[in-house]
Amino acid sequence: MIIISEPQCWDFEHSRVNASVVHTALLAFRDSQVLFLGEPGHAARVRELLGEQAPEEASRVEWRDLVIPGRQESGPGRLWREWNAIRSTLRSASRLHASLVLLTSATEIGLLLLKIQLAVSRPSAPVLAVMHGGLASIVPGAPRKRWASLRGLHLVFRLPHPRQLRYVALGESILSSLREIHPVAARHTVAIGIPFSWTVHALPPELSRSPSPVRFGYFGVSGGRGKGFDRFVQLADEIGGEFPEARFVMVGHLSTGADRMRFGTARWDFPGSPLTQAEYAQRAREVTYAVSVTDPYVYRVGASTSFLDALSSVKPGIYLRNAYLEECFARMGDIGYLCDTLDDVRDCIRSVLRDFPVARYREQCRTILTMRHIFEPATISARFRAIVEEVGRSL
């Protein structure tokens, strides 16, 4: 029995990634059953996607609801729900004699509570905890809260480490950066690529001609440190004045009230509320290039599901260089443009608007279709199994 728990995400959040994580575990351990614990709406979406990806393997999964904190909840109520979500996960593992516990995400306080409970319960099975954007808080120079060294990941990494626990970094480049920033944490961290399944499986039909208009798409939501949405809007306003025929769109939504106030009246198409799956897919289909100008310093320790969404839609990208994207380009080949500076991104967008590179664009799309298998569950499952077995041997 494998326990996979999602103690943080609601509804559609990371649902495609989590469905692919479950699929990876099922392929890695073909004789095992999986119990997935999650918020009811999220679990339903993961279940639906897994049924589409892997209908035969999906029969080995049981689904149970998990009470998790509300998106905006704070204070003692949030702390209590996070504690109970972790406790419910570990109790299920103990009751079912699980051979593996996998947390597909966790907040900083969630990881702290996990370490506390592991110190008390001491389960014999390996416990893997996936680290997402929260790692950015330990990057030198990152904004720090009061008493930062005594809270958040700074505190998590200072506490004694349970021998059965491993943190999961979603890429070798992230683990490499973590070794530089926090060697102690890196000693307890393993690297696994983000598993992902695709929505588009053929080349777009319009590749034989220059698209009109050319659409540049920001994939994802607006909020979050270092995501670069304000930079994207700045590019849109500057270049849109020079090239009125260009379009800048958002494949996602404005995720905070402040962003809705600031950008909701912009000339560009920025939805103010979450899209349906059909709306998201339609917008992704209409994009010509994905554009990402995330803060490369912050994203030394961050992977990008938005990048994978662009690959899923077979869209080449115009990207501001960071370590994670460098790793992906090195492994995949020509899947777009990797720019050193924001000025280079601006010049690249202008260049494709002046003279659209039809032949190269077509080859970039073909390369994406050929090489994105490196993120598929069938590819990642062997590495996943090897890591679990290695942790198990150390117990």
Image (cartoon, rainbow, N blue to C red):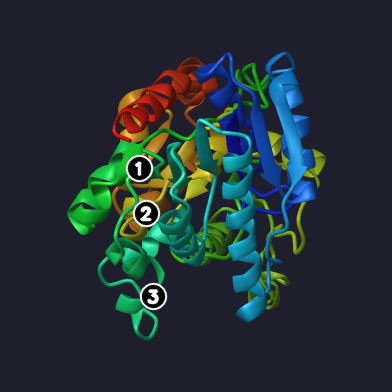
In whole angstroms, how far apart are the C-alphas of marks 1 and 3? 27 Å
Vertical order, 146 against 189 (above or below): below
Res 324 label:
1
Taking the view exactly as shown, the residue that stands out farthest to the bottom is 146
SS for tag 1? helix
Q: Is residue 64 visible?
A: yes
Q: Nearer the viewer, residue 169 or 196?
A: 169
* Residue pictured at 35% horizontal, 42% vertical: 324
Q: Quadrant of residue 221?
A: bottom right
* Horizontal side of residue 282 vs 321, given as left or right: right
Res 53 label:
none
- Which residue type does callout 2 highlight? Tyr
In whole angstroms, how far apart are the C-alphas of marks 3 and 2? 22 Å
* Placement of the N terminus among the 4 image quadrants: top right
* Residue pictured at 39% horizontal, 58% vertical: 135
Q: How busy is the neighbourhood of tag 1: few (under 14 within 10 Å), some, or many (20 plus)?
A: many
* Residue pictured at 23% horizontal, 46% vertical: 187
Is the C-beta separation of discs 3 and 2 under 8 Å? no
Q: Which residue is mark 3?
A: 151
Is the C-beta separation of discs 1 and 2 under 8 Å? yes
In whole angstroms, how far apart are the C-alphas of marks 1 and 2? 7 Å
Q: Which residue is mark 2?
A: 299
SS for tag 3? loop
Is the C-beta separation of discs 1 and 3 under 8 Å? no
* Residue pictured at 37% horizontal, 54% vertical: 299
* Horizontal side of residue 363 vs 9, given as left or right: left
- Which residue type does callout 3 highlight? Arg
Q: Nearer the viewer, residue 12 or 320?
A: 12
SS for tag 2? helix
Q: How busy is the neighbourhood of tag 3: few (under 14 within 10 Å), some, or many (20 plus)?
A: some
- Which residue type does callout 1 highlight? Tyr
